[in-house]
Amino acid sequence: MVPRYSRPEMTAIWSAENRYRIWFAIEVFAAEAMGQVGMIAAEDAATIRKAYDSDVLGEIDVPAIDAIEAVTKHDVIAFLTWAGEKLGPERRWLHQGMTSSDVLDTALAVQLKQAADLLIADLDKLLEALKTRAFEHKLTPTIGRSHGIHAEPTTFGLKLAQAYAEFDRSRARLVAARDDVATCAISGAVGTFANVRPEIEAHVAKELGLTPEPISTQVIPRDRHAMFFATLGVIASSIERLATEIRHLQRTEVLEAEEYFSPGQKGSSAMPHKRNPVLTENLTGLARVVRSAVVPAMENVALWHERDISHSSVERFIGPDATITLDFALARLTGVVDKLLVYPERMEKNLNRMGGLIHSQRVLLALTQAGMSREDSYSLVQRNAMKVWESDGQLSLLQLLKDDPDVTAKLTSEQLEGLFNLDYHLKEVDTIFSRVFGGASD
Amino acid sequence: MVPRYSRPEMTAIWSAENRYRIWFAIEVFAAEAMGQVGMIAAEDAATIRKAYDSDVLGEIDVPAIDAIEAVTKHDVIAFLTWAGEKLGPERRWLHQGMTSSDVLDTALAVQLKQAADLLIADLDKLLEALKTRAFEHKLTPTIGRSHGIHAEPTTFGLKLAQAYAEFDRSRARLVAARDDVATCAISGAVGTFANVRPEIEAHVAKELGLTPEPISTQVIPRDRHAMFFATLGVIASSIERLATEIRHLQRTEVLEAEEYFSPGQKGSSAMPHKRNPVLTENLTGLARVVRSAVVPAMENVALWHERDISHSSVERFIGPDATITLDFALARLTGVVDKLLVYPERMEKNLNRMGGLIHSQRVLLALTQAGMSREDSYSLVQRNAMKVWESDGQLSLLQLLKDDPDVTAKLTSEQLEGLFNLDYHLKEVDTIFSRVFGGASD
Amino acid sequence: MVPRYSRPEMTAIWSAENRYRIWFAIEVFAAEAMGQVGMIAAEDAATIRKAYDSDVLGEIDVPAIDAIEAVTKHDVIAFLTWAGEKLGPERRWLHQGMTSSDVLDTALAVQLKQAADLLIADLDKLLEALKTRAFEHKLTPTIGRSHGIHAEPTTFGLKLAQAYAEFDRSRARLVAARDDVATCAISGAVGTFANVRPEIEAHVAKELGLTPEPISTQVIPRDRHAMFFATLGVIASSIERLATEIRHLQRTEVLEAEEYFSPGQKGSSAMPHKRNPVLTENLTGLARVVRSAVVPAMENVALWHERDISHSSVERFIGPDATITLDFALARLTGVVDKLLVYPERMEKNLNRMGGLIHSQRVLLALTQAGMSREDSYSLVQRNAMKVWESDGQLSLLQLLKDDPDVTAKLTSEQLEGLFNLDYHLKEVDTIFSRVFGGASD
Amino acid sequence: MVPRYSRPEMTAIWSAENRYRIWFAIEVFAAEAMGQVGMIAAEDAATIRKAYDSDVLGEIDVPAIDAIEAVTKHDVIAFLTWAGEKLGPERRWLHQGMTSSDVLDTALAVQLKQAADLLIADLDKLLEALKTRAFEHKLTPTIGRSHGIHAEPTTFGLKLAQAYAEFDRSRARLVAARDDVATCAISGAVGTFANVRPEIEAHVAKELGLTPEPISTQVIPRDRHAMFFATLGVIASSIERLATEIRHLQRTEVLEAEEYFSPGQKGSSAMPHKRNPVLTENLTGLARVVRSAVVPAMENVALWHERDISHSSVERFIGPDATITLDFALARLTGVVDKLLVYPERMEKNLNRMGGLIHSQRVLLALTQAGMSREDSYSLVQRNAMKVWESDGQLSLLQLLKDDPDVTAKLTSEQLEGLFNLDYHLKEVDTIFSRVFGGASD
């Protein structure tokens, strides 16, 4: 975790405090269930639950627990020792018949669920920002580019609607990934429930909002976590896509949009004229970071036999790093979208800078429909288009076509003019918007 | 694609023949729809459709198409030229108002859907094999191991049930990934439907069993493909897990199970005594191969503006490689599971080789329940357990405990004997099986 | 391997023919050495060597060997059976005391060495092309960009010189990686030379131009291969860098350079005006492919004990794929550089399009040197620069500064004009070129 | 960075304090050189250098600098503001004509060099430990295993010698990677030295022990860093290999070696008998973590034009994470090797548990040398070997062979006994040791 790329709420999920609170909740709910099924004294179980409900732990004294761990060399035992002091003799029932992994893996599930909830909320904010700006620029014409080369007109709203649809898909994937990872395992040393009955697991799962893991082997199987981190990797890749789009739009020669630049801000210590897309460049890098969790998460799946502990060190890194970084990145991207400076005049200027070349396909189609073969139509358009291209947009394709007798043999001037029409390209924008955002296409 | 790791049905999906047939179907269905909406002459559209229904293409002459492509340098145009010759003058309506990507991306969606269907069928066969063997060995006791060290008893059926549950999850993920990737885009040069109406896309999608892509930008967005290949990567990781388990079980010193070894087979050219787990080792390597598609698929997401073509070369590799290899790997794993030689006597021997140490936790719990503190109980058990450990299982933990006055002060010989009971560990197997496979836990 | 991204010479290295020839060479050289040390009859060894020197195998009948393998299920034995038929009774000495891995791993080393030699030759051609074009444009001014935003002037030659230096470093790394991987192991089943003396290995290594592996364990350790493929991954990343640069330069709005476009070429089937940087986009994708070999190659290192065979399937993919693709990519990039269309006038136009903003730093420094504080100088320049920025380069920074009394209080008009001088930025180009290409800086 | 997987010396390299000290050194050495070439007043330069030599900064007040950065939003400017207050008016010459990247990239080079130095020292300690233990067990016989199956005898010293050779190679690679990354760039906004002469760079490089970057583009090219992190990834993979070996050896059924287990240690909270290889399992996970830096480092290479800043966030993670984790892992592995409990008696027991099967190849060769065809020899040995195999080593291969008339027709009992000789497999150990560790093979 790098502090400058973190936000407090997500960071708190990965704090020692939160982890300990979850551990305690698991132990308490387990004890409560054990009381219910008669594994331990019912009154003691009730006492433990009551203590929990009145927040018996109070503030967590992490250094004190660390000090105990320095002796016991076991984190769960250290915590239980510290927490036990807050209880009376009923403390002896804590962790009865359980294995450390019962606590550790279930706690990780809670943390990942909490993290997923935050990320889903982040996505919702991003989606809202994208939707607002998409509708704002629904009909703002701009050049569509394939291969970085001007192709045909589109609208800036469509660009944002595309991003909306992409992040909306990722939201659904993240909900699925959250469900996948939100399971509870209290099944003992090799998952046989030998010393802890399945009812315990069921109760803890219910209290924590988790699903019981159908079959565990001391640990919750790591294909669940692999799927979770892979999903984060896909979301990060979509962040990279939108960030790259904005970086392109802010290029000096393009400048159709810009990250917000506050009046007193310095773009460069050396060059006072610079206004750099540093936020989206940063997001491009953060996407690489989030993605780097995917392969180790997959390598974690093949644990030996009923478990080995090689996954643990990996998760201490990627658990916080991937979620904290993605949370930060989504929030940063939302801010960028919210405040993005959009320059419709520049879009129009760029649209027109190629001397009308962007209408070449439509002329091609019209010639074909006028009875010319596709091959001949193509050559005819291309020979005029290339002149415009080489003039760097100084020549007008429409004029050249009007002057080309092979063209005018098929199409009149009026017909040609009709083909150079921006609205023609925008006529289905409503349809697309209603496909993306729902609602009637009016 | 490496021929020795491929099977014909999946390979056929990625053949030039199949690709061309899908291209033709797309063009035909598009023409049909254009006829319906009046973009082209209705009779011509009908003629085209009729020709398609009577398999006008016959055998695909790939070299002939290649020869045309060598001239045109454009694969779609080359194919259309060849295919057009099979039609009458109505051929001129093919590809009307469409962009190559309309064909290419939709065709890729069909191929990925076909591939996913095969992989789901593969998973079904693997699940069937796992289920059969799991029930066969539902109550075959075997040692559960954590950290590669004997822990407590479990059953061989539970090991297989765990794998069943894991692949069953992956089946659900693959169904979702298939749906994610099975979309159809016929939306023109920058996705605005300027020259091709949305109805065309809707018709083609319906005919091909795809969903219309809500918003495309010449291309179908690559987050879909990234999710697809990530899912394959997770499945591959689960294959690695089960393969690793079997490799461990076949180790000379363990030998609780073995890949099937036919009577005349040679394990090693130099060492006539060898029987090696080469299939599962091979699967371990193939898992790495499938997984290697995940990162490039994610790097493919951030295409520039409305599209660049950098994804294309990547997909020419990972499309066939990941699906063909995974198909082969799933089938190979199914064969391994089906024919796996299982040695219950050896499992029993291994279970007993540690002089009863596997029951140490239960003694610990009994001492605690008899009123001893957890700390004292632990030391008491550990001091006896370590002697057994150092004797390499020659000493008996039960006997040592019976001889330890600190123990016998709390537990009688009869009580101690009752703790060394295998059935205690198997009592919830039914419950777990019904959680995994459904049905009442009888 | 994808045929369209392959070249014959590199593909031939990975052909069955080449592999079999190398296998035969290893067996023959081993037999020769065994004759020398008296392990086998000296005359028989000489006969074998003589047969080899007269190319006794002739054309390799791959289907015949495949047919034998279908029976023996062992590739080395199948080949030896086929090859043995070309020899007399001395054939019995082939493979004496050797293990299949002795042949397979040493053969892979030869193939990787051959591949590395080709790649080094590819790099030499690329370096030559870069050097030629760099000197051609040594003093062609162009705008340097940071963050995609105009920064200060540089030259197009410097851009190419930078790429030259980068690929020159990669050449040195590849030479090191080749040496790393070019080792020979003929050490028997677990590397102890129990049945084959070290002299055999030494002789085979010498004949094949390899180094004896100091310590092998049936196999050559895979850290060597991991380093090799990691090096290819770095080279691929540098290809991506230069390809990305060219893609940027070819953008419609920038258009300072372009991939060569032959007179009759079609850029787009739908849009006759398009000239797309498809080669460099393709290279961007191929870079991802080559890079995807790195992680599996690293995962191959941790083989179990003296060896397991999980690496083998991985290498059947990445061995050919990474080298064939990189060879193709380097050659394609060389062609792009060789024939790159460079537009110095457009570079000049772009340089000037920002109204002189690119000189802002120099004004800042001059104001500082004239005694103004850095903070004040910065504000002064920035307030004028922002006006130019907002005018989209229609205003002139020089003129605004001349009109700003706070500026003219420190710098005269003549002094200001002197600061807007392109040559100032080019004065160290010679120095840099001599650092990169060697030779005196004249 | 995860504190529990970090050591103070490496962590200190990545502290704010160290970074600021390096920044200051760069600025001071640059000013000194500017004084020498007359860019700034010589006395002022001397004053700055003198202040540096007397440690004018004293303790670095990181919070104070952070407070300034919160205002300026620029880290280098914030630091210079704070540092400037420690100087007199000569402070104005700091950073003259330089760009932030001149400081940042050169400082990163210093940090990576410092990190590499530590890692090389770590490797030296690991090599020393491996060498000591290798010589200790040079002739300790143990079974060599391929595919996890007993193959032929080797020695435990050879296993360690193999690891020694592997890490020795990685040491050489790391020295090369350190040299690759240890360059200094003080070349201005786009690397043209427009406002800062090459002599400045040369002087700073010399003072810091770096090489001047031949050609930079505001930034030092990232292929250097990619190579550095790739090298760390290879080293991590070798750690995984040795860790995996030890994990295998500690398995309950194998138990030929064990991680040191202190008298009072608890292996498991639930199972008092457990002694788990948790350190090497942890190392397996840490290897995945280090390796995860490789792909993002490669993705960092293709910066746009003269630079974009996407690499920066990535490096804030992987710079500390990969080096701190690898440092910790190397030290942990050294400790494991140093204190590894080795059980020669168990190795001997395992060697013998297969009833002499490990000598099967030698019998095969002897039969061949006695004139039998290889095929017949193989069947003969295999038919006896399989009986031993199926008896789980209860039968003796030697005895079965002595009882097989087809065998005794070729080999006498005495000859057969001579083939079951362990020393035969150890006769080249000296040779191999001298190849790995140098020195005469006596």
Image (cartoon, coloured by chain):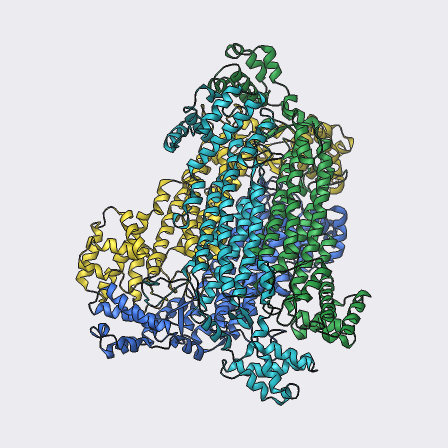
Chain colours: A green, B cyan, C yellow, D blue
- Is residue D28 shown left or right of residue D173? right
Q: Is residue D247 above or below residue A10?
A: below
Q: Nearer the viewer, residue A90 or A2?
A: A90
Quarter of the figure with residue D198: top right
Residue D410 drawn at (x, y percent): 20, 72
Q: Is residue D278 above or below residue D223?
A: below
Q: Position of residue C95 (x, y in %)?
A: 27, 61
**Left or right of C87 on screen, residue C363:** right
Residue A276, position in %: x, y? 67, 39
Taking the image as shown, residue C362 lies to the left or right of residue B397, namely right
Image coords of residue D15 (percent x, y): 66, 59
Above or below residue B388? Residue A8 is above
Figure quadrant of residue D148: bottom left
> In the image shown, does B173 or B390 lie closer to the viewer?
B173
- The answer to which of C426 and C209 lies nearer the viewer is C209
Q: Looking at the image, is B224 positioned above or below residue B426?
A: above
Q: Nearer the viewer, residue C154 or B335?
A: B335
Q: Is residue D50 visible?
A: no
- Horizontal side, residue C73 vs residue C387: left or right: left
Quadrant into which the N terminus of chain C falls? top left
